[in-house]
């Protein structure tokens, strides 16, 4: 064995540690107190926020990057989760919008392969864009196997609370024993007062579910699909007043987002506290991430772009993992993506062969070694595909990550941008002209992936009239010249 191998925790030692003896837990903290022996198989709690930017927490996602935390949002529960677990500085949502990410999390496949690439209906030729986006899948298919179905096969109880947003019969038809039904954004609107967007109602149901499974000695999966940060104006009154007092000159929307962020964090803290009281915190993996980016949330954000765009602000998201074998306080900068969670959970739970087409890779090597560990996927590159128009984005686009490099391909004018994210996180210095060979290599790799998975692509619009203005009716945009999005710089 080499010196490097002696210094690096082996995969075998990591997996053996999952079933090893007791550690301490006291006063709701991770480190010291009464002992507990973890069960043979761990529990999983997936906490999914909605429209939360990479720097939307009071936790620095990468302490080496200035602006990787909010300068005024307060999330003490997530600060605790980060102290007791691992932050992923280069975590990505599979899509810059919500529903494709949710489908990807359930199946371990990328949105391009699933043919669900947008949440809202696609535009048509009549909408007057230069390209016609594909008419994508709008619901989860019965033919797909979800993470809940895979875990149930090995004895897990499963629950999904909050925003489903995938139709297809709802969570109960796709492997979840308990759930809130076939819900979408609108189902949160009626909840206000002391239970904004049902944050604390969801928490109560999840706590009751965990209590029943702990009493029965049965491992479980709970997905908490929070509606927050939607309907931020419904944050608790006291929380809104707190942030208004902190920054009297702040825009109303900024105050509401900050308040809803703290209310969400409070709900997370209540669930974490319940796991503590049940004595199962140490045997439970808790994963926190957002369904898509939301651009910069606070002054000095290092990321360009936002929701509906494949610049870093649209796809890089906060992600924290705590659980057996995960080193406390660690920071990992290896690129990871949401569809890595299905193979991770399945490996830790003892699921055998995964369904065909799973694109993600297990994160367990990163738990064992956050710096040198590697995620093994079917392909080395990570691809994002958004062949649609949304808001003031740059039109249909795809992106590919490979090593430090990222290439974006805009389909309206066949333009490509190349960035070295290790030196230019804000994506301000396009290297395509200076590095034509690298740009050509990544563009070819992107095209090869999209062809291999049968990705749906935009097509020319024969009715396109550049002399007319178009209206982003379904996105609430304002009239502007057709094609102006493609001409905009990051």
Image: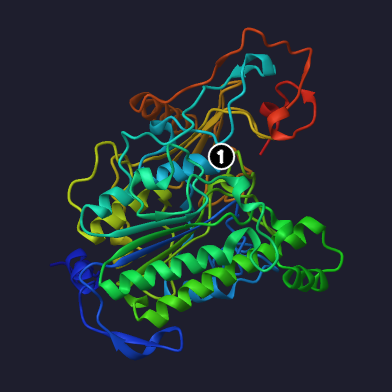
> Residue placed at 47% from the left, 44% from the top?
101
Residue at x 75% of width, y 24% of height = 471
Q: Is residue 28 visible?
A: yes
Q: Nearer the viewer, residue 231 or 418?
A: 231
Q: Which image quarter holds the C terminus? A: top right
**Whether residue 61 can be seen here:** no
Relative to the observer, which residue lies in front, 219 or 70?
Answer: 219
Q: Position of residue 28 (x, y in %)?
A: 45, 84
Name, please, the residue furthest toward the top: 462
Pointer 1: what residue?
Answer: 310
Give the side of residue 177 with respect to residue 203, left or right: left
In this rendering, position of residue 469 left or right of residue 109: right
- Relative height, residue 460 to residue 271 (above, below): above
Q: Residue at x 55, y 30 (%)?
A: 397
Residue 102 image offset from top left, x and y in percent: 46, 45
The residue sitting at the right extreme is 249
Residue 413 location (% of width, % of height): 61, 20
For residue 323, which quarter of the picture? bottom left
Kindly identify the residue that appears in the image at 52 percent across and 74 percent down: 270
448 in relation to 463, above or below? below
What x and y, as percent, mark residue 394?
64, 31
Please name whichever residue, 473 or 359, is drawn nearer the observer in this view of the structure.
Answer: 473
| Image height of 96 relative to 319, above or below | above
The quadrant of the rendering that contains the N terminus is: bottom left
Q: Is residue 428 above or below residue 123?
A: below
Side (left or right) of 214 relative to 351:
right
The picture quadrant where one finds residue 475 is top right
């Amino acid at each position: 064995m080499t010196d490097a191998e002696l210094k690096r925790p082996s995969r075998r030692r990591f997996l053996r540690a999952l079933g090893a003896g007791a550690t301490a837990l006291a006063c709701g903290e991770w480190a010291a107190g009464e002992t507990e022996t973890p069960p043979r198989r761990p529990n999983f709690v997936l906490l999914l926020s909605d429209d939360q930017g990479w720097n939307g927490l009071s936790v620095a996602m990468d302490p080496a990057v200035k602006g990787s935390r909010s300068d005024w949002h307060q999330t003490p529960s997530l600060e605790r989760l980060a102290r007791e677990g691992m932050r992923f500085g280069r975590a990505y949502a599979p899509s810059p919008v919500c529903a494709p990410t949710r489908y990807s999390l359930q199946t371990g496949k990328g949105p391009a392969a699933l043919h669900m690439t947008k949440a809202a209906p696609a535009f048509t030729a009549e909408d007057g864009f230069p390209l016609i986006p594909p008419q994508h899948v709008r619901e989860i298919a019965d033919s797909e196997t979800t993470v809940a179905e895979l875990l149930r096969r090995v004895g897990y109880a499963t629950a999904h609370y909050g925003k489903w947003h995938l139709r297809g019969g709802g969570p109960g038809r796709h492997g979840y024993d308990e759930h809130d039904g076939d819900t979408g954004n609108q189902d949160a609107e009626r909840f206000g007062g002391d239970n904004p967007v049902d944050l604390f109602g969801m928490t109560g149901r999840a706590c009751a579910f965990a209590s029943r499974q702990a009493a029965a000695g049965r491992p479980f999966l709970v997905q908490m699909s929070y509606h927050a940060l939607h309907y931020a104006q419904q944050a608790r009154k006291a929380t809104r007043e707190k942030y208004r007092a902190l920054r009297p000159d702040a825009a109303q929307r900024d105050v509401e987002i900050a308040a809803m962020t703290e209310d969400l964090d409070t709900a997370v803290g209540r669930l974490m506290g319940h796991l503590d009281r049940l004595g199962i915190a140490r045997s439970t993996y808790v994963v926190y991430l957002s369904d898509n980016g939301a651009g910069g949330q606070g002054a000095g954000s290092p990321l360009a772009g936002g929701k509906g765009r494949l610049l870093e602000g649209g796809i890089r998201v906060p992600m924290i993992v705590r659980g057996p074998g995960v080193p406390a306080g660690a920071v990992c900068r290896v690129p990871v993506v949401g569809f890595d969670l299905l193979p991770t959970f399945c490996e830790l739970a003892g699921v055998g062969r995964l369904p065909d087409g799973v694109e993600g890779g297990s994160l367990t090597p990163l738990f064992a070694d956050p710096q040198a560990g590697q995620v093994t996927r079917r392909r080395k590159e990570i691809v994002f595909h958004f062949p649609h128009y949304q808001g003031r984005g740059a039109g249909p686009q795809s992106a590919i990550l490979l090593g430090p490099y990222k290439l974006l391909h805009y389909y309206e004018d066949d333009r490509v941008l190349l960035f070295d994210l290790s030196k230019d996180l804000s994506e301000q210095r396009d290297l395509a002209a200076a590095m034509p060979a690298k740009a050509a290599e990544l563009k070819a790799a992107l095209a090869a992936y999209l062809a291999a998975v049968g990705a749906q692509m935009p097509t020319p619009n024969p009715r396109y009239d550049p002399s007319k203005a178009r209206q982003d009716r379904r996105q609430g945009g304002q009239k502007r010249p057709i094609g102006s999005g493609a001409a905009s710089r990051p």
